[in-house]
Amino acid sequence: MGGWGVKMESEMLSEIFTRFLAVKPIFKDREVLRSTYTPDHLPHREAQINNLAYILVSALRGETPSNVLIYGKTGTGKTACAKFVGRELERISAVQGQRCSVVYINGGVIDTQYRVLAHLARLFDREIPMTGWPTDQVYAEFKATIDSKEQIIIVILDEIDKLVKKGDEVLYNLLRINSELTRAKVSIIGISNNLQFREFLDPRIKSSLGEEEILFPPYDAHQLSDILRERAEIGFEEGVLEDSVIPLCAAFAANEHGDARRALDLLRVSGEIAERAGESKVREEHVRLAQTKIESDRIHELLTTLPTQSKLVLYSVMSTGGKPHLTTGEVYRAYMNCCRLTGMNILTQRRVTDLISELDMLGIISTKIVNKGRYGRTKEITMSIPQEMVRSVILSDSRLKVLEGYSPSRQQTLTEKWDV
């Protein structure tokens, strides 16, 4: 019986694959529709590309380029432009016989001084274990490795603000390394979505890192349409996109702070939805379905990756009886009860207020300050996303499963019990 079942499943899968292969393909190369792809042309970023190239051209003369800090919101082309200019710099330097390397590190992934230095050393063929060595030794090994020959190294530190959150020692070391090198030279290109992160840096680091600054403004709907058309020409088969698809994707993304990544994701997912439905064309309805799917996936990922205490605060907002407007005091009382039910440590009301502000910044809840006259001012809180999604994700966390069935009436009982 088991063998028969496996055979049946195999035949079903074979039939599914055959059916999908019979459908006329929509994509020519879907990889070019991903944000990780670096194209040969970046529309509406000529000024930023020229500015960065002007700063880095000194490397072709054997000189140390200035350090650069690149700012801009997500999806404004910062990383793509830095990689594009870096790739061209390496190509031209090779033609001229100049040793110039441009290396890329994502500070959101490689986020400690040890890991950054070890990764850099490995890029230059010096094997260092991922753990176990003193950080000073890793730094010394990296320094000795690159200083073995005359060369210029440009390190792109993407999401540099996330790296700095773990400490700025690695920045301090990389920015002072040239004073300890005799043959090699190092420059830093920092990329950040956070315009304020420099305010938290040590003054010595701030002055060295921001020798040059380049701002990337958001794209408007017209610019996003141009970007999508160029990618669509090489990403989709000819004639599969209805005329309204690209303008609609661009309009949706323009509302999301001019995010080109969002526009590209919308276009790609629209095509995937049409493809799975066996359609030969991508239409406006597929874009609207893609918008819903991407937003749902984004919210789910956001909720899943929240710290436990933030989940408790969010569940407290949701569990206070569905009132349209809540005060921080009401949320804090519910939060204390949730902590007692789950056995979690209770944070101070000040810290919980900070977590409420963080949830507001993420767009999960909405807050506003309301003047109550002689009773002073208070912060009113409302949910910004579907409660059922919040409940489902939070209760899937084994540590918070006990909150299932928590209600305002139970909250009152617990409040009395604990003398809150």
Image (tube, grey):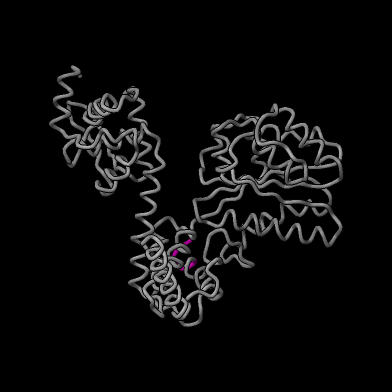
Q: List x then y, in percent, for residue 415.
A: 17, 22
Left or right relative to 371: residue 197: right
Main secondary structure along the magenta-highlighted residues: helix
Q: Residue furthest top?
A: 419
Residue closest to the eye, 137 or 102: 137
Q: Residue furthest bottom?
A: 239
Determine the residue positioned at 26% across, 29% down: 338
From what the image shows, is residue 58 above or below residue 414?
Answer: below
Residue closest to the eye, 266 or 189: 266
- Which quadrant holds the C terminus? top left
Determine the residue positioned at 17% across, 26% down: 374
Q: List x then y, in percent, for residue 160.
A: 58, 41
Residue 69 shows in this picture: no
Q: List x then y, in percent, for residue 89.
A: 74, 57
Q: List x then y, in percent, for residue 381.
A: 25, 38
Left or right relative to 396: residue 137: right
Residue 254 shows in this picture: yes
Residue closest to the eye, 381 or 71: 381
Determine the residue positioned at 45% across, 76% down: 18
Q: Bounds of the magenta span?
A: 219-223
Q: Quadrant of residue 87?
A: bottom right
Residue closest to the eye, 246 or 135: 135
Left or right relative to 263: residue 83: right
- Which quadrant holds the N terminus? bottom left
From what the image shows, is residue 401 above or below residue 351?
Answer: below
Determine the residue positioned at 50% across, 69% down: 228
